[in-house]
Image (cartoon, helix red, strand yellow):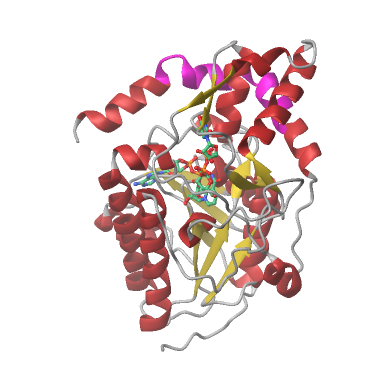
Amino acid sequence: MGSVCSNYLNNFSMKNILITGGAGFIGSHVVRLFVNKYPEYRIINLDALTYAGNLANLKDIEDKTNYTFVKADICDFDKMCSLMQEYDIDGVIHLAAESHVDRSIKDPFTFARTNVMGTLSLLQAARQHWNGNWEGKRFYHISTDEVYGALELDKPEGSAPYGSEFFLETTKYNPHSPYSASKAGSDHFVRAYHDTYGMPTLVTNCSNNYGPYQFPEKLIPLFINNIRHGKPLPVYGKGENVRDWLYVVDHARAIDVIFHQGKTGDTYNIGGFNEWKNIDIVKVVIKTVDRLLGNPEGTSEKLITYVTDRAGHDLRYAIDSTKLKNELGWEPSLQFEEGIEKTVRWYLDNQEWMDNITSGVYEKYYEDMYKNR
Ligand code: NAD
Ligand code: DAU
């Protein structure tokens, strides 16, 4: 196994940080946090602006002097090499990915291309640029709990936790969807670059995120928007699947802590011990939206429509993030009730953001993405 110069990063030695996927949901929160918190860093946001990338997510920080946006595809290896040199990149926080499970079922090739080949392209470009001098360098790959597979629902009644097992950092990978298989492939490449070349890498596996700026193909923003328009709420199967939800700003805070203090070569799970059955979270969302819109309680429950289940739908995800808490002191800052209230309010207060996506622009991106494949 290759050796790594320093396990813990000296903040002040790092100047130029490349954040990939910064125009997406989680990436935009990470870019915002880093640009505002670290004026001494230069933050380069690299994003291909696929259908999921939206520069409107970053309007509040786009004029900051320590922020630069570059439109590029991580699969373009020559471009990755030239950008590494041009900006003399010290650290990479890699979030760019195809992220939606349903799309991966329709179009697995795009997921293999971006998530596996794109990550490899970035790794190799970083390796060439750093040329064996790992001091003060860091390649941090953002992954998902979905790589671990699905847990049993062996305590389905009552409140969470809904099973006796949790995903640990040591849980064997067992991905089921093309999305999670592609993320697993990328995680393996990142670890291989650490073990083979000594690259100072970090991998984190996080649970479901929710919050502002999430693309409305994902459960929570899709349902908030559909309630607003009186449209059906398509619950897959019986709504019994369990997901573990974390407010996106808490994920960004964890990324900050791990990027600066995480032990290189290591893996950390990120989650808030916050399991919900889909049907229960849908009811919370309905209740909150109805209340904030001034509708009588329960008005929108009639919109719930049970539809054909997602193929290979993982039953339960539940992250154990004890290692992160014990080693680096991170804990979520928000209780779920507060987080969902903030989230629903944000979507209702930012209807223009949503309408710009749903009023045809979304369809256009979708067509553009698929027409040549
Ligand atoms: P997202 O789909 O909202 O954003 C992805 C971003 O990547 C977009 O801005 C898109 O334009 C960009 N992108 C896609 N392909 C690209 C390419 N080839 N080159 C450059 N940029 C490209 O995704 P998200 O939900 O913000 O997820 C970000 C990362 O976090 C992903 O790696 C995802 O696997 C991981 N993750 C997400 C969650 C979640 O709940 N959303 C949970 C755990 C981990
Ligand atoms: O667990 C982390 C993962 O969470 C991330 O890696 C993914 O990038 C992210 O998309 C998310 O994946 P999920 O598939 O869990 O998220 P999604 O919002 O698509 O679905 C959440 C649950 O709700 C899931 O069990 C499927 C269900 N669902 C989803 C949609 C969009 C429905 O019942 N109806 C829907 O219309």
Q: Which residues are magenta?
A: 343-361
Q: Residue 293: x, y in percent?
A: 75, 13
Q: Residue 137: x, y in percent?
A: 50, 73
Say above or below: 106 vs 129.
Answer: above
Q: Is residue 261 visible?
A: yes
Q: Residue at x 50, y 58 (%)?
A: 143
Q: Quadrant of the C terminus?
A: top left
Q: Residue 372: x, y in percent?
A: 19, 32
Is residue 5 toward the left or the right of residue 182 in the image? right
Q: Residue 10: x, y in percent?
A: 64, 75
Q: Quadrant of residue 154?
A: bottom right
Specify the principal SS of the magenta part: helix
Pick whichever, 69 or 265, lies toward us. Answer: 265
Pick whichever, 263 or 307, lies toward us. Answer: 307
Q: Quadrant of the N terminus?
A: bottom left
Magenta span contains residue 345: yes
Q: Residue at x 29, y 40 (%)?
A: 107
Say above or below: 273 vs 289.
Answer: below
Pick whichever, 44 or 367, lies toward us. Answer: 367
Say above or below: 124 vs 149.
Answer: below
Magenta span contains residue 210: no
